Image: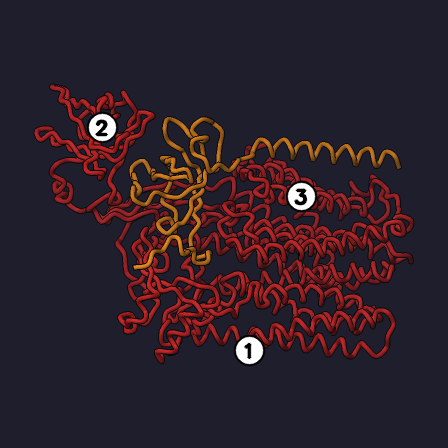
Chain colours: A orange, B red
Amino acid sequence: MKNKYLIGGFIIVVFLGLMGYLFTQTNVAYENNFAEIKHTDKTIKATGAWVKSKGYDIDNEKNLFSFYMIDNQGVELKVVYKGAIPNNFESSTSVVVTGKYKNGYFIASDILTKCPSKYEEQYTEDTASNI
Amino acid sequence: MFGNIAITAGLIFSMFTIIMYYFSFKGYNNTLKYARLGYHSMTIFVIIASALLMHAILTHQYEYKYVFNYSNAELPTGLLMSTFYAGQEGSFMLWLLFTSIVGLVLLEYTSKREDLEPRVMMIFTLAAAFLLLMVSPMLKNPFSFIWADPTFVEIKHLNQSFLSMSFLQNFIFQDPGSGQSFVRLSPEFMGTLSANGIAFEDFLIKGKGLNPLLQNFWMQIHPPILFVGFSMATVPFAFAFAALLKNEYRDWVKQALPWVLSGTMVLGLAIMLGGYWAYGVLGWGGYWGWDPVENSSLVPWIVGVASVHTLLIQKKTQAKGGTGRFGKTNLILAIMTYLLVLYSTFLTRSGILGDASVHSFAEPGMLVYWLLILFVGFFTLLGIGGIIYRWKYLEMHFNYEEDLLSRELALFTGAIALIASALIITVGTSAPIFGTSVEISFYNELNLPIAIIIGVLNGFSLLLKWKQTKGESILKNSKFAIISTLTATLLMIVLGGLYDFMLILLALSVNFTIFVNAEIAYKIWKGKKNYIGAYIAHIGFAVFLLGALASGSFAKDEQLDLAKGESAEVFGHSLTFLGYTPIENGTKYAFNIEVDKNGSKNIVSPVMYIAEFNNSLMREPDIWNRLTDDFYISPVGYEDGSSRSSDAGQSIMMRKGETKQFNGLSITFDSFNFPPEAMAAMQSGGDFYIGAKMTVSDGNRTVNLEPKLQNKNGQRSFVPDMIDDMNLKVNLENLDASGNVQVIFSTLDETTKTVLAPKEVLTIEASIKPFINLVWAGVLIVVLGFSIAAVRRTKESRA
């Protein structure tokens, strides 16, 4: 009887320990302050908006897609992604990129775009002006 | 209007039903017929409300915000009908509709089984009542009018002939960011509109339409089946709680089993269809991305599967009288299955995942947020509270010791392994609540050993006998399975090139499962055929794992450019881009690629188009399905030869001292030219300029140039600089105090670029997915196995 709980308890402790360890190893934090991102070499999920006025750039030879993102404080970040421009990119209201900051660029391994289709209309009295 | 009356009536009837069932449970004789009447009335009103919503969608009644937001007249009927559940409101409505209908079957089922009906239906109706509350007016109501809350509608949705009318001008707004014009709809506006004798249906004439990602066949079947699965997950909870109410834990097991089996089957099928959708149409490249929304339907499924196994043990051990083993576990698992469905609803509907998921919904508003919390919290309190309340009794009556070599213990261990997997996925999925997230490797690395353990236990448990087994008999019984397993795995290593240690272990365990189950299934096939369900499901699961192993570890992909008419080689395939053809009335373009593999040819046509809905480039992959592998082509981009980048050009950032190459020139950014008087002028708001000093060298000579930021009469502008005889123009885009500049280099004679002979180039990503068919086949075999088992257990539940 006692053995059963001992073994069971041991397995649970090992399992939770393993899970906790991997959790910290694979953990990716969200960051919406780009000034912070430039000071760390950890993998980060940066959230912000695409700077539409600066467009984007597609380098077909190197298979790179790059664009600028801006955070709430107005800090910009150049994002370089190895791969194709994601579906829905042009209409995205916000962008989440996963990756690391290196040599002046944010090297993204994943881009997630949030499109307004799933959102209620976000225009409010403040953003729209009467003509 | 009528929709809201129906929903409100349904809500009232649901309350009435709960109360009447409660009285019946307390022993009143005459209340049961009222309860049934109440439940049927509730269902009728839910069906009426759903029919009204469907009617509003089919007849394009854009006065309903929901209809306006998700549909338009251009959609074909099938897709138009699927907009019923394209948004939050409608998908709650669909869930409610299915819950009500499942409840009708449940009512019929429980009414034939002793005193089960009041206890089960009371709880079940409570779940329906919460869903009714969710879609009721004020909350996620699909019948709210578009003008109820002031809403900005883009001009393009309106009847253009009214736009010039003078009264309208007071309601037109412009978004300074995008330059788009909107009309602000409000109750006040409606008054003005009708005062001018314009009917609203003539005014707002075009709906927003459905997101193009959802416009395909799978949208029409995946969500409904998923919601049937969600609805059926309520049933085990109701059964378990009914057992707790009566404090009697024997009969609910056989009564709940067919429901658990069929519910798990439906949910599993729905998850697979979602996976196929992602793979075949959305172009994710795979069928599973550990996305929170996928995960949150997978977790209840895993717990459901675990509970099937422990319920079976309890039922088996009841044969000799008593309530059987694992009574506590079964109660907990049955309750958890539904709680996890609710938790997943909370995660995906509350907006809490926010940035973490591709398809999480937007924030629904505080009221709905708290109702979701109340929904989850209430049922958690009910379920867990019920178990705690009965814990002492349960503890006294359910305590057994298992022999180490018994099928009971092996099955139980298997269930524990499944729950461990569910726990891992839940932890990973919930991470965004705490402002963090996990990488996909978290799921893969932790679930791989669990899959290995489950495979071994699956085969092993079937070799064991109930209660206890002698060591020799296991060896004797497993001879065929062990030899076949070793042979098959060896073949995979030698022929398939499987070298990873963990994956070899997985292959061993999966093969073991297949051979043990196949041997038993073969024997059963000659005897009691309806007992074969479990073994078929096991084989299906193992086949699925083999498919996941092969397609996951041996997939290859490569991006390549295909010039029109020229052929390129990739993975032993010769690809020739033949050109594109417009499809679907010219709204989309199919890019036809001839694929030649050792003489067998096929045309693969991935699709790209600009969707009007979101003004975005959409891409759809195409697949050459073959028995042993898929040749998968995702379109990446298409160049007709004229330009290569977006309007803004190649904007480059340079740090102080950095050198860049352009067109055979080396360009170095030396320093800022920031004269002291500029500083003073900047503070006083006067005119000034800041220059970016650069040196350009073509190898022979070095020239200076200086594009500037200029402030003149309060207007800021950038002044480009150029060197004529080096054919260079430098546009300054931005500069910041940390010492960086943003510049665009271009040649002076931009026109020379377009003079180049246009060459049509299609960029694609080609990949080979070996044995991906095993993934689909595996799940379908599991579904088949579950169906056979559900039929058998339904028959037994009457005994």
Q: Which residue is mark 2?
A: B690
- Residue that badge 1 annotates: B2
Please, what is the three-letter code of the amino acid marked with disc 2? Answer: Ile
Of circles 2 and 1, the one toward us is 2
- Label 1 vs 3, first from the N-terminus: 1
Q: Is residue B776 left or right of residue A84?
A: right
Q: Is residue A61 left or right of residue B463?
A: left
Q: Position of residue B338 (x, y in %)?
A: 69, 56
The picture quadrant where one finds residue B63 is bottom left
Q: Residues within 10 Å of mark 1 (few under 14, many from 20)?
A: few
Q: Earlier in the sequence, mark 3 or mark 2?
A: 3
Of all chains, the one bearing label 3 is B
Q: Front-most of B246 and B571?
A: B246
Examine the rendering and report whether any part of residue B27 can be seen.
yes
- Subunit of mark 1? B
Q: CA distance from mark 2 to mark 1?
A: 67 Å
